[in-house]
Image (spheres, rainbow, N blue to C red):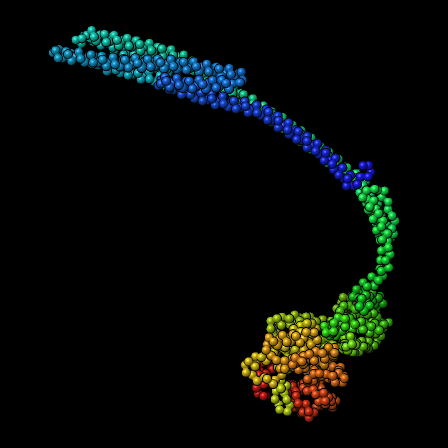
Amino acid sequence: MKLHNLTITQRLIFSNLLSLMILSFAIIMVIRSSYLVESTFKTQSQGHVEILTKNSDISRQVSSLTSRVKLLEQTFLFSETTLSKEATKIDLELQQLNELSANPELADKVDDFVDNFHRFLGSSLSLNRILKKIQEIDDQLEEQIDELAFHINQGELEITILGGDLHDEHNHTLIPMLREAFLTTGKIVESVHSRITPETEKVLIIEAEKELAILALHLESVDISVDIDSPELASHIRKMQITLRKYHAALSRIKANLAQRWGVMSSLVDSQNQLIALVEKTEKEVQIEAFELAKKLEAEISESRLNAILTSVFAFLISILLVSLVVKKHIRKPLNDLSAGFARIESDGTSRPINLHRTDEWNHIENTFNQMAERLSATYAELNAEKKNFDFLAHHDPLTGLANRLLGTQKLNEAIVKAKEKDSSFFLIYLDVDEFKTINDSLGHTAGDNLLIDVAHILEELVEGVGFVARMGGDEFMLVAEDRRANSEEMFLLEQINQSLRKSYLIDNKNVFVSASIGVCQFPYHGSDDETLIRNADTAMYHAKRNGKDQYRIYDDRMTLEVTDIIETNAGLRQAIANNELVVYFQPNLNLTSKKVMGAEALVRWQHPTLGLLQPAEFLEIAEKSDLIIDIDKWVFGEVARLISEWQKNGEDVADIAVSVNFSSRMFYMPDLSDQLKTILEESGCQPHQLILEITERDMMRDYDTCIETIVELRKQGYRIAIDDFGTGYSSLSVVKNLSADFLKLDRSFIQDLDTSTLDYEITRAVLTLAQILDLRVIAEGVENQRQLDHLCELGCNKAQGFFFSKPLPVEGWLEFLSEHR
């Protein structure tokens, strides 16, 4: 295999193997050094251990022998047999000790110790025999003294028997003195074996000789003339004198033996000390050798460690060098060429083939890069062609084609800069489609999208040439119009927007009636930056919605404070629903002919924990801006159903009483409205025919076709339907003709001037006539005085409600009113 054909992996493996070989050499050196150190330590330490073991045995045996020798010195007077046995044992141990002494010098010392011990043993045996002999002499002398005393006493007895006179008692006094001298001598001789010092032993021998001399004097002083058998007494005394001479001779031998024995003992102690000193010397030499051996081994280990470190560092450096060379030549250089190729592609999108002059893996990478670069160039061309389209999509709404929030805000900032430069002003108009969520929920998002497209076209036509329009999100639009006309003309533009959007739209073959709520602010009077202008215009738009929708409002600073109150009210209302703070009041409606109660309208109130009882006008408008209105509608419906069932259980006669419940457009246009109402009624036990569902004419016209379908479905289930605030919406005769409701509730705006306005009178007459033709029952709202009541009766209206009959009543008041007007 040629070197230039090696792959990068193979080159790296070769470099690493070389480094491993060098590192392995270092490890082998360390192992070899460790082996040598271990071998040296094992060999020399074994010799030291043997020497120390032998010396330890010698020291132990010498100490044991010394102790036994001392014991022999103390016990040699007692038993020769014991002494011989002990001497035999000691002699065997001395032979073992001699066998241990491999060192010539140590062997000589051991031999000296053995010789001296044998001399000491012979001296001890000789002394023991002398002492035994003295013991025999001592026993013989004691017996002779007793016989002497017997002879003297017998002689005196015979003299007395013969009638002689014992005029001399000298012999009687000598016997105790003889005994005393004998006993003293015996005690002195017995104390000789305690061996205090040589001088003490000599003194004791001298004292023993003196006592023997005293004993001899006392013996010579014995008067033999008093004894009848004098020759026999004299012979006994001579025997005792012979015994005393033997005693003297034995003491002389003891004296000579002790002198010799102390010399032998001194030699034995000297040889023992020399032997122990030699052992200690040997141990010290072994310790010195061990210390030198440890230093030598430490030096060898340090040298081995240094060699291993140097070799490892060398291997590491070689490895780094080899890997660096491989990386530099076979990785970094090709990567630099590739990087240069990528840089060319990135800078201008052009592709120029690269040539790495490689036959390893880089050859495949080179081919792949060249192919990729060619494809990237084509892709760059396509991307440049699509770039403009992407830029348009990033700044425009894909549904309507209008500027989106990003582009709209940019244009607004450009208008601000331009107005500041020219010291001019412009109007920012913020627009929201009323009840757009209801349309989306009832007809679907596709219908909602089509409606937004129509609205966008209308707005573009209205501001063409005087400004621009942008879709800010959802159903919100922003218009910026230059202040090039008088204020009256500007107001005309706002009214024109309202009128242009206030119409019926045909969407998915259904007529949808739409209006818009508009908020307006003017630069720089209502804000000097984009965020402030948009926020203030949105606040003004919210006030337009709150005040009835389908209108415009110009921003005022007080609106911001009101919005804050609205936010707080919205939060409090959510808490009120959760805490069950809502209550239902009932306003009766009566038959004007019989004056009897026909039913009631359920009206919600809020029992605020701090503000007291709040009227619907104080919170319902806020709820209608969010899904809170749906929660409130459901709660009122469920509460009314629960109360009706409760009244029936309590025996109240409400079988022919119908209670009407108001539904918002959001509630009424829910796709599953009938299913939700059915679930609520099943929980309460109330029947649908006891309830009238009310929807305003205005909400009905939002999506008339869907409204008709919903009404038909609800009537099938047994509910009755009432069109509230009739006359204020945009329904036509064709719409009324096809209306499948049960009741029309004539708006109070026609009733309040009924006694003074001929127009209201005639409109009321027309509505009653139309209702009669269409078989619809009419309930007049807002009757407050007798004149209004009289006119209604005159026109043929037979059902009404209002303060003239009763204000909305709590449950207890309503039940009392019902019982009074049955």
Q: Position of residue 701 (x, y in %)?
A: 74, 79
Which residue is most to the top? 231
Which residue is most to the front? 1
Assign the N terminus to one quadrant of the image: top right
| Residue 34 visible at all | yes
Q: Is residue 125 left or right of residue 515?
A: left
The image quarter containing residue 73 is top left
Q: Position of residue 708 (x, y in %)?
A: 72, 80
Q: Position of residue 719 (x, y in %)?
A: 65, 81
Assign the C terminus to one quadrant of the image: bottom right
Residue drawn at point x = 83 percent, y = 49 percent:
369
Tally of marks: 0
| Residue 502 visible at all | no
> Considering only vertical position in the picture, is 280 above or below 254?
below
Residue drawn at point x = 69 percent, y = 72 percent:
626
Of the pair 233 and 388, the residue shown nearer to us: 388
Residue drawn at point x = 67 percent, y = 86 percent:
779
> Considering only vertical position in the picture, is 74 above or below 607?
above
Which residue is most to the left? 163
Of the pair 417 and 301, the residue shown nearer to us: 301
Of the pair 432 and 1, the residue shown nearer to us: 1
The image quarter containing residue 214 is top left
The image quarter containing residue 714 is bottom right
Residue drawn at point x = 53 percent, y = 20 percent:
281
Q: Position of residue 406 (x, y in %)?
A: 79, 64
> Considering only vertical position in the picture, is 488 above or below 346?
below
